[in-house]
Each structure stands twice: as C-alpha cells, then as structure tokens.
Amino acid sequence: MKNKLTILLLGITITANAQWQQSIGSENLDVQAVHVVDNLDFFGGQTGTYRSTDESATYTFSNSGNDSIGPTRGITSDDTYIYTCTSQGVFRSADNGVNWTQKNNGLTQLLCHGIISSDGTIFLSTLSGVFKTTDQGDNWTAAGMSGIDSRSICCMQDSILFVGTQGSGIYKSIDDGQNWTAVSAGVTSTNFRAMQAEGNTVFAGGQTGTGVYRSLDYGTTWSLLTNGIASGSYRGFASNSNMIVAGSFTDGVFYSLDNGDNWTQINQGLLDLNIFDLELNNNYIIAGTHIKGVFRFPLSELSATSINDEFQTNQTRNLLKIADVLGRETMPKNNQVFVLHL
C-alpha cells in the first residue's frame, strides 16, 4: 500500500554515502586538540596551534607566542579569551588566536593535558594534579588531585567536575576541586584519556581492552557501552543535546543519537583511524587524527526522521519530515542507508 507504514517507528537514523574531507593545511600533522569558538575552528598538536575561518575546510598556522617546543594538547575559551594547554603551561589569546601570551603564574606543573572553562573558572589537568583560575589565567591555584597524573577533565552542569587519570581511574568533585572522590564502580580501566558531560550523562574513554563507559547517575556507577561501538582506547569526544561522538585510537569515529545506547561507525574517507580529539561546529564533526591532520564530516548526513508516534489501531503512519541532528529540515538523498530504531 502506497505511503503507509504498518509498524510504529520511533525514529530512523540515516547515514548517507558521505565522506570525511581532509582539511587543507593540516595534512600529515599530529593533531591532539580541536576547539570551536563562534565561527572560528582551532586545532593544536605537535607543531602548535592552527586556525580556520571556513569551518575547517582550510587551516593556517597561528602560533605566535604559543608553545613552540612541545605539543598543544588542549584548547578552551570563555567570553573574552582563548586558552591553550601545552607542554609549557597555559597560553592566552585576546585576538582570536592571532597572538598568544604565556599565563603560568602559580602553576607548579607546566606539563598539562586538559583544559576547560566553566562558569567563570578555568580548570587545568596536569601531570601533578588539577589547577584552577578565577581571573582568566592571570593567577593559578592548586585544585586538588596533588601528585596524580590527571589526563582529562570535564564539567557537568557547571558544578560537578570529573577527572580521568593515568593509572588511578576517575575522580569527581562537587566543590570546585576542594575535595575529590574516586568514582569507579563498574569500571575496569584505570586509564582515562577523555571525559565528556552532556546533560545528566557522563562519558569516559577507557584504555585498550575496554572502551567507552557511561554514567547516568552523576558518576556513582558506570557501564561499558558495546552496542555498535568497538572496544579499545578512546581519546576524544564531542557532543550536543542531540548526539555524542566518540573517537577511538584505532577504529576511527562512532556517533550515537540516543545518548550512547546505539552507535554507528563513520570512517569513509578517513586516512587515519587514530583519533585524538573531536569537536562540533555549526555544520560539521571535526576530527583530529594522529598523523594525517584534521578531517570534517557534514552533520547534514546524519539525520533523524520524525515519525507520527501517536498510535491508533489500524491507522497508517505518515512521514512528517526528515531533520538533521541539529533539527534542521532536510531532504532525502539517493543511496542512503536506513537504520531503524524500533
């Protein structure tokens, strides 16, 4: 029967024959961090920082004053500045990444791995614990985890901090780092190189032999996710209210539109499946790879179809619209693969 569905569909995920596109100016570079600030995209890596003004289609070197000795491992921003986390501490830019100034006053450990901005405070995870600044990097103070190799950090709801460590599992603080509690129930990994919080959910990237863990109760318990996502080491995440993207260090990129319950792998066109970091801009997923630079994948190719879900016996189901993961209405494309979630 034409234009009828005989079963109730709650949603459809569409993955078209889209490919990743390599960003010009990033080829064959070691990328360890990516970040989006308004209409600018940044990446940092072994050779410093690079900037894009065209949604990661092209990048130019933008490292004046930034660390030129070791890698740039993290990038964050607030309403005024952009910050890098490097082997030589923290650098700050007041002109959208054109020039950088070192901001290390109070830091007793310069080798840092992760940096985030949350509600007026910037937190830094380092080889020797966590530091924070409340004056935009002018002065830093210790924020706990002293002596613990802290590799990743994220913030949930501007008040709950999570830190992933090298060798000591996951820790949580609810008082801006004054006190920390180990939260590793259900976790077998001791190394966590990536953390991501979205809404009431926290994702943690474990070591080789484990994979992506998820907590739905503020870190009290964790579950290893396995439906469509590979085991292995995970180094990067990106998320918005509609999707979570995970970067494997051996198996490329996976995304989920249902908070991690189900995952789809998207690797077509990727020249390096070793992913260090991920980010989302207005129209693309941005992936930083280990040896082949930055790639971008169009969000418009990851679509969720809205279906009339008011079930009535013996009535038909009509397709209402096709919308991408940002809620923008789009049109169906040829040769698309449909994955049904019933």
Image: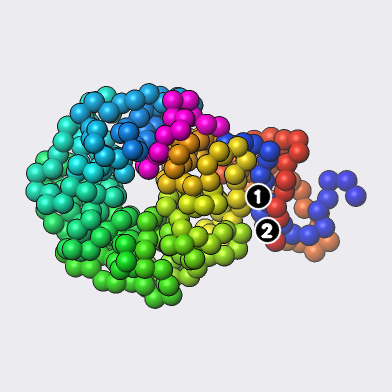
| Residue 146 quadrant | bottom left
Q: Which mark is residue 206?
A: none
Residue 58 pos. (x, y %): 45, 25
| Residue 279 quadrant | top left
Q: Residue at x 23, y 68 (%)?
A: 180
Q: For this view, does 102 lie left or right of residue 6?
A: left
**Front residue of this view, candidates 234 and 83:** 234
| Residue 50 quadrant | top left
Residue under label 1, please give it: 13
Q: Residue at x 60, y 50 (%)?
A: 265
Mark 2 / mark 1, whichever is N-terminal: 1
Q: For this view, does 184 lie left or right of residue 223?
A: left
Look at the numbered disc 1 and give the secondary structure of its residue. Answer: strand
Does the image show residue 42? yes
Residue under label 2, please give it: 341
Q: Does the segment drawn in magenta span residue 147?
A: no
Amino acid type, label 1: Thr
Contact between labelled residues 1 and 2, with CB atoms less than 8 Å apart: yes
Look at the numbered disc 2 and give the secondary structure of its residue. Answer: strand
Q: For this view, does 218 lie left or right of residue 125?
A: right
Amino acid type, label 2: His
Q: Does the segment drawn in magenta span residue 29?
A: yes
Magenta region: which residues?
21-39
Q: Residue at x 61, y 59 (%)?
A: 228
Cα distance between the residues tagged 2 and 1: 8 Å
Residue 29 pos. (x, y %): 42, 34
